[in-house]
Image (cartoon, rainbow, N blue to C red):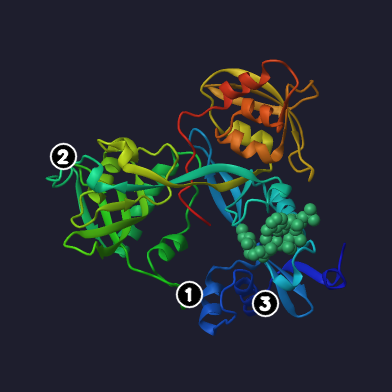
Amino acid sequence: MTSPAASGVVVRHVTEDDFPDWLLAHKVGFLRPPVVTDEEVALRRKVLDPERTRGAFDGARCVGTFLSFAQELTAVGGTAVPAGAVTGVTVSPTHRRRGVLSRMMNAELAEAKERGDVVSTLCPTEYPIYGRYGFGPAAWTTVWDVDVTRAGLDPRWSGPEDGGRVDLVDGAAIRETAPAVHDRVRAVRHGVVSRSERVWQRDTGVDLAPGEPWTEPFYVVYRDASGEPAGHAAYTVERERDGGAQPIGTAGVRELMAATPAAERALWRYLCAIDRVTRVRSGRRAPDDLLPELLPDPRAARVVSHVDLLWVRVLDVVRALESRTYETAGSLVLEVRDRAGLAEGRFRLEASPEGAACGPTTETPELIVDVAELGALWLGESSVARLVVLGRAEETRAGAAARADLLLRAARRAWCPDVF
Ligand SMILES: CC(C)(COP(=O)(O)OP(=O)(O)OC[C@H]1O[C@@H](n2cnc3c(N)ncnc32)[C@H](O)[C@@H]1OP(=O)(O)O)[C@@H](O)C(=O)NCCC(=O)NCCS
C-alpha cells in the first residue's frame, strides 16, 4: 500500500545546498538530538560526496538518507575487489514502511553494478532489513574478555623476547605508521576492508563532529628487531576498586592490528601485562583469532559476543569467483537466483590452486542458491551442506554440495575489523 505522503517522496542525489536538511534527517533517523550546527555542516562538506549521497525528499523536507563510498574488500587469497560500501541509511519515523529505503537501495545497487563494483557491503543495525536486497551475513566477529589473573601468564614479563619492542605513541604517530601495517594485513586476510585517510583521522580523534564523544586512547606500536612497525594497538582503561585493596582495571581494545605473528603475540602479551589491568576486552576479532590460544589457559578468555558484522551482496558473480583463490581443484555449475536480476544466472566455475575461470553456462545446474547466500560462500564462511539442510541451497546433482564445500573452504575465517 502506498500512502499519499510516500507517493510524493522524491529520491535523488543531494546537492551541497541539501546538506543541512540531509544531516538533520540523518540525526533524526539515528535518534540523535535534531540540531545541526554550521560547524557540523562544514565538516560534512569535506567528506560527503554528493554523487554518492542520496536523499528522500517530501517537499522541502529530507526524510531519508543513504550514502555509499568506494571500498576495497579482500577476497580469499588476498585480492582486493571493488566494493560499494553502503552507510548512513535512515528513513524518518514519519515516513517509515512506505518503501523509501527500497527505492534508495534499488537505485544504489543498479548504480553500483553500472560502476563495476563486484560486491556491495554494509554493517546492518538490525538483521531483518537487508536480506531482501540480496545481502547476507558474510563475516562474523567475536569479542573476548580475558581474565588476566587466570590466564597463567608469567607476571614478570618485561617486553617482547624476540628482539622487537613495544612503544607508547600518540595519534599522529599512528596515522603515520598504522596504514602500512593495515595494508599488509588486508593483503592477506579476507574480509578486511580498505580505510580512507579520513577513517584514520576519525579513529585518532581528528576533526570529530561537535559533541561526538571521544576519549583519547593509549596507543602502542610494535616494532620488529629491524625497527620496522609491524603492529599497533589502541586501548582505553576503566579503573575501579573492588571495595578493598585490590585494583580492578579493564583495558578495552579499540584496535589491534598485527602484520606478523610476532607482533600479534607481543601486543596481546603487552595488553595482558599492564599493571592494575585485570581484564582485557578484546574488541572485534575474527572468530578464529589467536588470542585464546596465546594464553597458557585459553579458558581465561570468555566469549562476550559473537555476531554477524559484514554483510555482502554479490553484484558480479564471475569476477567475484575468479578473484579468490581455491585450495583444491574442482568444478561447479552454480545457479544464482536474484530477484533484482543483478547477479542472476547460471555459471560454471573451474578452479584449482593455480587459478579460476568462471563464465555463464547453459548446462544443468548442480547447485542452486539465492544471491544472499553467495557472499558468505564466496568468503569461505558458509557450509553448502548446512545450507541444503536448512533449505537455503538446492543440490540438484548428488555430491555437488560436498564438492562445493571442498572448493570454497578457506583455511582462516574472514575478518572485518571495521564497522562502517
Ligand atoms: C531501517 C529503515 C531505514 C527502513 O526504512 P523504510 O523506508 O521503513 O523501509 P521500506 O519501507 O523500504 O522497507 C522495505 C521492506 O523492508 C522491511 N523492513 C524495513 N525495515 C525493517 C526492519 N527494521 N525490520 C524488519 N523489516 C524491515 C519493510 O517491512 C518492508 O517489507 P516488505 O517489502 O515486505 O513490505 C528505517 O526503519 C530506519 O531509518 N531505521 C532507523 C535507522 C537504522 O536503523 N538504519 C539502518 C542502518 S544500517
Q: Earlier in the sequence, mark 2 or mark 1?
A: 2
Q: Image point 70% across, 71% down: which residue? A: 93
In the rendered image, residue 105, in percent from the top left (x then y), is placed at 72, 56
* Mark sitting earlier along the chain (3/2): 3
Q: Tell me if mark 3 has few (under 14), some (14-19) or many (20+) residues whose alpha carbon lies within 10 angstroms of its own.
A: some
- Say which element carries label 1: loop
Mark 2: few/some/many CA within 10 Å (<14, 14-19, 20+): few
From this view, report whether residue 215 is shown above or below residue 355. below
Select label 3 or label 2 by which is in front. Answer: 2
Q: Amino acid at mark 2?
A: Glu
Amino acid type indicated by mark 3? Asp
The reply to whether discs 2 and 1 touch (Cβ–Cβ < 8 Å) is no
Q: Which residue is mark 3?
A: 18
The label shown at residue 293 is none
Q: Is residue 150 above or below residue 349?
A: below
Quadrant assignment, res 276? bottom left
Mark 1 neighbour class, 10 Å CA radius: few under 14, some 14 to 19, many 20 or more: some
Q: Looking at the image, which is closer to me, 247 or 65?
A: 247
Q: In the depicted view, which residue is nearer to us: 205 or 91?
A: 91
- The Cα atoms of the two marked residues, 3 and 2, are separated by 57 Å
Residues at marks 2 and 1, CA–CA distance in whole angstroms = 42 Å
Where does residue 146 sit, x and y in percent of width and height?
Answer: 31, 47
Q: Is residue 66 visible?
A: no
Query: Quick check: can you spot residue 373?
Result: yes
Q: Which residue is mark 1?
A: 209
Residue that numbered label 2 is attached to? 161
Q: Nearer the viewer, residue 271 or 229?
A: 271
Q: Are marks 1 and 3 in contact (CB under 8 Å)?
A: no
Identify which residue is drawn at 34% across, 43% down.
301
Q: Position of residue 3 (x, y in %)?
A: 86, 69
Asked if the residues shown at circle 3 and circle 2 are in contact, with their CB atoms under 8 angstroms apart, the answer is no
